[in-house]
Amino acid sequence: MLEPLPSRQIRGLARTFYRRGWMEGTAGNLSIRQGDTLYITASGRPKGTLSREDILTIPLNGAPPVSSGGRSPSAETSIHQAIYRLAPDTAAVLHIHTIESALVSERLGPDLPLPPLEVLKGLGIPDPCVPTSIPIFENDLTVSDIAKKITSRLSGPPSPVPVLLIRHHGTTAWGKSLEEAVRHLELAEYCFRFILGRERLP
């Protein structure tokens, strides 16, 4: 049976991110939406060597089932579902763990102010000099509670930046296409590296 395109895309992207050090071990999770179905990485699987069986299909809404092979969808499925509901034109949600995102998320307060870099245009900010920030959410062992906080906080006007941070955890980015979601993730991580590098300057 031919492997669905979203499954192939997720496995390829997971390998790429693993090689970058963004999804080491079993860290992180990726999903792509097709209609009312999500293709999402299974929980606890090594991201550098995902198999076809490690990409599960689940309903956009409702409790995710356990696959027939005994694999369960990512523990953070509820966060993906929340973002798809908040931004209905979202086609992909990507979550990675990097040292940079963990460090910048240590900032006090509910937001991370972004520097006025030209790359913000790639995040949908037409004027980089306009103050822009990324929301930070507290980590919680009960992931569904994080999803509820994301829904509550982002349910108003659309977030100016399609990225959020979970403190001491990682970055989540989304987009209207897989390519756009990847771009948002890469540019957010670029901003994080800039912030940390600027702090090392004398």
Image: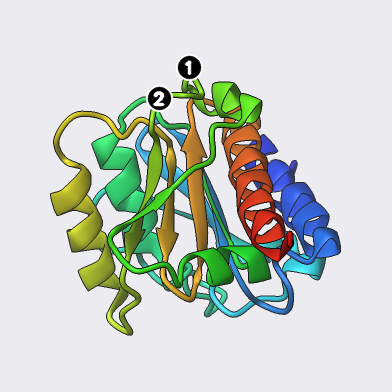
Q: Which kind of residue does numbered mark 2 sit on?
A: Val
Mark 2 neighbour class, 10 Å CA radius: few under 14, some 14 to 19, many 20 or more: few
Residue at mark 2: 130
Q: Is residue 154 above or below residue 45?
A: above
Query: In the drawing, does residue 6 fall left or right of residue 94?
Result: right
Question: Is 116 situated above or below 165?
Answer: above
Q: Which residue is mark 1?
A: 127
Q: Is residue 83 visible?
A: yes
Residue 47 place in picture, x, y as percent: 72, 68
Marks 1 and 2: in contact by CB < 8 Å? yes
Q: Residue at x 86, y 62 (%)?
A: 19
Q: Is residue 84 above or below residue 160?
A: below
Quarter of the view holding residue 137:
bottom left
**Type of amino acid at the residue the image marks with label 1:** Asp
Name the residue located 26 percent from the left edge and 40 percent from the top edge. 85
Q: Is residue 135 left or right of residue 187?
A: left
Point 55% across, 71% down: residue:
102
Q: Secondary structure at mark 1?
A: loop
**What residue occupies the far front of the structure in this picture?**
202
Residue 136 falls in image quadrant = bottom left
